[in-house]
């Protein structure tokens, strides 16, 4: 029986998922600026046996027609937020085994800055950190914020990300020999200079020449996560990621994406089963089905078309409310700039959230009205599971068995009470069924997720880099 991996998807902001929930009494997420709030969440997950706490992050925010929609700040829709990376050392100090994953883009900082940050975090957490590699989000917003002349095209960003990761890996993997650090007080020698090596790199996007001044951390390289279900995203994940976060739309689509990523990984000489592939899920559980449905109804009552539109436009550049509600997204072919308020950004951001509504299996594409209805109360979340303890456990098991997934990232609609309910009610049931171990795993994040050693596996290209 396959063991279930569990993470929690969060943001250091009023709420996760781009939906509206922070005003509800069950939610305490408006305390996101308080370290004590996150310490309580991290300890809950640590003791319940979760594998990691995942922080999405970025500089972007939702816009409609190039302007910050008033509902974004008024409703707290993916705006505002703080940098979650600074929380991680605090949370690691307050926990024993929980891993921490944070998003960092390949489109802004130089790879040296990212390598230094994650090596530092890996030291401060005792090897419990992961890097969620993204090529960017809200790219039109980022281009304006950072003074770029133009937004880089979707697939071009992945080409840059290939090079970005390789250079970061060269710092981590080749800069220091395993036995370079001596810390010999008597000889007054900290490190053997013959075992500290320069990194020389000349690429199309980045250059670097010099020494990486951070000693090898417990994992050397943080656990590599990637979230992207576009064709280019799946190819990138298959070659680079150790844990992949796929979009949860339908069971069939998820199963196809899981199989595709594993097949691509095998083609690149990697063990396809070594990848941990997970999907987001919002779980509303109660002592009874009726109690769970009542909670979910209260959440759904807060959602509107305007909330959906603010989020979707920020993610894809498409203003749904400006389109004909009775036609599909194929109407953008008539005027590609129409859906993005004349900015021409449609199709270069949030590609997965566009492709999902343009089916290629011959089935009819949903209308804009149907898209709004489908996303209402869901936002960027994955699967929605509501019911009693038995019903929730059954559905999670079924999703794993039917898709080949390795586990789930919980996306709470009411944080942290949804997580408390899951830890109290569902975790014991999953343990009883053998899906979770009686005693949570320990060690570095990579050891906990893979059951292997703390360093990159031999079949990952980063482990084979030479000076």
Image (cartoon, rainbow, N blue to C red):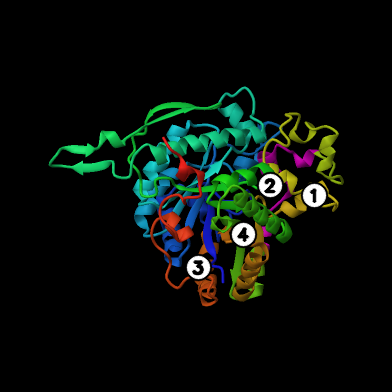
Question: Which region is colored magenta?
Answer: 297-322
- Which quadrant of the structure image shows residue 330? top right
Query: Decide: marks 1, 3 in contact (CB < 8 A)?
Result: no
Of marks 2 and 1, which one's residue comes earlier in the chain? 2
Element type at mark 3: helix
Q: Return the residue at label 1.
A: 359
Q: Secondary structure at mark 1?
A: loop
As drawn, the label of residue 281 is 4
Left or right: residue 254 compared with residue 60: right
Sequence-wise first label, 3 or 2: 2
Q: In the rendered image, is residue 170 in sight?
A: yes
Q: Residues within 10 Å of mark 1 (few under 14, many from 20)?
A: few
Secondary structure, magenta segment, majority class: helix
Q: Which mark is residue 307?
A: 2
Query: Which numbered disc, 4 or 2, marks the residue closer to the eye?
Result: 4
* In the displayed structure image, the side of residue 285 where residue 120 appears, left or right: left
Please tell me in which quadrant of the rendered image residue 262 appears. Answer: bottom right
Residue 302 in magenta stretch:
yes
The numbered dot on residue 423 is 3
Q: Across the whole image, how many numbered discs are drawn on residues?
A: 4
Residue 166 numbered mark, or none: none
Element on which disc 2 rests: helix
**Label 4 SS:** strand
Q: Residue at x 53, y 27 (%)?
A: 203
Which quadrant, please, contains the C terminus?
A: top left
Is residue 302 something that shows in the picture?
no
Distance Cα–Cα, label 4 vs label 3: 15 Å
Looking at the image, is mark 4 or mark 2 earlier in the sequence?
4
Label 2, residues with CA under 10 Å away: few <14, some 14-19, many ≥20 = many
Task: Tell me which label, 1 or 3, sits earlier in the chain.
Answer: 1
Of callouts 4 and 3, which one flags the residue occurring earlier in the amino acid sequence? 4
Q: Spatial distance from mark 4 to mark 2, Cα to Cα?
A: 20 Å
């Amino acid at each position: 029986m396959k063991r279930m991996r569990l993470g929690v998807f969060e943001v250091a902001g009023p709420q996760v998922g781009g939906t509206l929930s922070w005003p509800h009494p069950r939610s305490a997420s408006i305390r996101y600026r308080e370290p004590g709030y996150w310490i309580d969440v991290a300890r809950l997950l640590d003791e319940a046996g979760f594998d990691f706490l995942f922080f999405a992050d970025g500089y972007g925010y939702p816009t409609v027609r190039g302007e910050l929609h008033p509902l974004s700040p008024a409703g707290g829709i993916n705006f505002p937020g703080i940098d979650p990376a600074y929380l991680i050392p605090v949370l690691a100090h307050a926990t024993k085994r929980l891993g921490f994953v944070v998003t960092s883009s390949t489109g802004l900082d130089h790879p040296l800055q990212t390598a230094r940050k994650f090596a530092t975090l890996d030291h401060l957490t005792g090897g419990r950190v992961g890097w969620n590699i993204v090529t960017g989000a809200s790219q039109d917003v980022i281009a304006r914020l950072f003074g770029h002349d133009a937004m880089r095209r979707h697939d071009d960003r992945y080409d840059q990300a290939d090079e970005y990761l390789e250079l970061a890996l060269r710092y981590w993997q080749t800069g220091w020999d395993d036995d370079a650090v001596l810390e010999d007080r008597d000889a007054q020698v900290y490190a053997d200079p013959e075992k500290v090596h320069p990194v020389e790199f000349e690429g199309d996007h980045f250059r670097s020449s010099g020494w990486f001044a951070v000693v090898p951390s417990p994992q050397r390289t943080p656990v590599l996560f990637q979230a992207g279900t576009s064709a280019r995203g799946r190819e990138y994940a298959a070659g680079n990621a150790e844990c992949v976060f796929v979009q949860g739309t339908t069971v069939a689509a998820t199963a196809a994406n899981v199989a595709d990523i594993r097949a691509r990984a095998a083609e690149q000489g990697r063990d396809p089963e070594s990848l941990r592939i997970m999907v987001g899920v919002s779980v509303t559980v109660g002592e009874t089905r009726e109690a769970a449905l009542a909670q979910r109804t209260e959440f759904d009552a807060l959602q509107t078309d305007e909330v959906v539109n603010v989020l979707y436009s920020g993610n894809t550049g498409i203003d749904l409310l400006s389109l004909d509600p009775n036609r599909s997204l194929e109407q953008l072919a008539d005027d590609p700039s129409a859906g993005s308020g004349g900015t021409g950004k449609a199709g270069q951001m949030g590609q997965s959230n566009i492709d999902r509504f343009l089916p290629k299996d011959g089935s009819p594409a949903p209308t804009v009205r149907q898209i709004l209805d489908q996303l209402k109360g869901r936002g960027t979340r994955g699967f929605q599971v509501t019911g009693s303890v038995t019903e929730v456990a059954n559905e999670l098991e079924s999703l794993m068995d039917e898709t080949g997934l390795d586990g789930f990232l919980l996306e709470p609609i009411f944080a942290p009470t949804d997580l408390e309910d899951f830890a109290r009610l569902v975790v014991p049931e999953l343990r009883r069924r053998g899906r979770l171990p009686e005693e949570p795993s320990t060690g570095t994040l990579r050891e906990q997720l893979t059951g292997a050693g703390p360093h990159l596996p031999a079949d990952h290209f980063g482990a084979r880099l030479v000076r």
